[in-house]
């Protein structure tokens, strides 16, 4: 492997597990090599049959120390906004703030192929045609993150108060 004498290339990134990999374990070597090369970002795509974004993101977070991690993109139509928010806030915590959630609407033929009803696909297309509704979806996800963080803060306050009264 080339040695770049500790240089960092924060503006450069790579797509881990591009396409349909033979094994998702390939990302371990890819991410470690990327950090060694000084790359700044790791982008993660999603495929229903082999690359689930939350799992892959967690693995990248576990085998890296510095590189920024981003979904590019996870489909907001296949997860409840609360689950997506929990995934994003957990990754943010796990990685020390290195995670960015990228959302995408997916493709009709893929959604149909995995058995999502046509009404779901029609709803997705209606949302794409109506920008304010798309903003509402993003707002729902962000509110979900806010609610989750508020819940975590409440748990922290309760535990801190319990610890204070125990001493």
Image: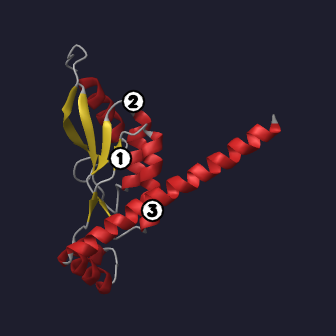
Q: Give the crowd class for mark 1: few <14, some 14-19, many >=20 residues within 10 Å.
A: some
**Mark 2 lies on residue:** 65
Q: Position of residue 1 (x, y in %)?
A: 22, 21
**Mark 3 lies on residue:** 144
**Is residue 76 visible to us here?**
no
- Left or right: where does residue 109 sit relative to residue 99? left
Residue at 65%, 47% (x, y): give it: 157
**Is residue 34 visible to us here?**
yes
Mark sitting on residue 148: none
Q: Nearer the viewer, residue 135 or 19?
A: 135
Q: Position of residue 120 (x, y in %)?
A: 32, 81
Element under label 1?
loop
Is tag 3's residue or tag 1's residue first in the polypeptide sequence?
A: 1
Q: Give the crowd class for mark 3: few <14, some 14-19, many >=20 residues within 10 Å.
A: many
**Mark 1 lies on residue:** 24
Above or below for 116 versus 151 = below
């Amino acid at each position: 492997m080339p040695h770049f004498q500790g240089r960092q290339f924060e503006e450069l990134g790579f797509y881990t597990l591009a396409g349909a990999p033979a094994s998702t374990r390939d990302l371990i070597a890819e991410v470690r090599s990327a950090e060694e090369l000084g790359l700044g970002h790791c982008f993660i795509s999603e495929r229903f049959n082999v690359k689930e974004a939350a799992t892959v993101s967690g693995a990248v977070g576990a085998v890296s120390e510095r590189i920024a991690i981003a979904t590019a993109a996870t489909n907001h139509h296949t997860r409840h906004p609360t689950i997506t928010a929990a995934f994003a806030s957990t990754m943010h915590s796990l990685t020390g703030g290195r995670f960015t959630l990228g959302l995408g609407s997916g493709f009709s033929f893929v959604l149909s192929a995995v058995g999502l009803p046509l009404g779901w696909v029609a709803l997705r297309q209606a949302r794409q045609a109506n920008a304010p509704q798309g903003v509402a979806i993003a707002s729902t996800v962000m509110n979900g993150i806010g609610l989750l963080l508020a819940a975590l803060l409440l748990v922290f306050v309760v535990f801190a108060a319990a610890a204070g009264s125990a001493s």
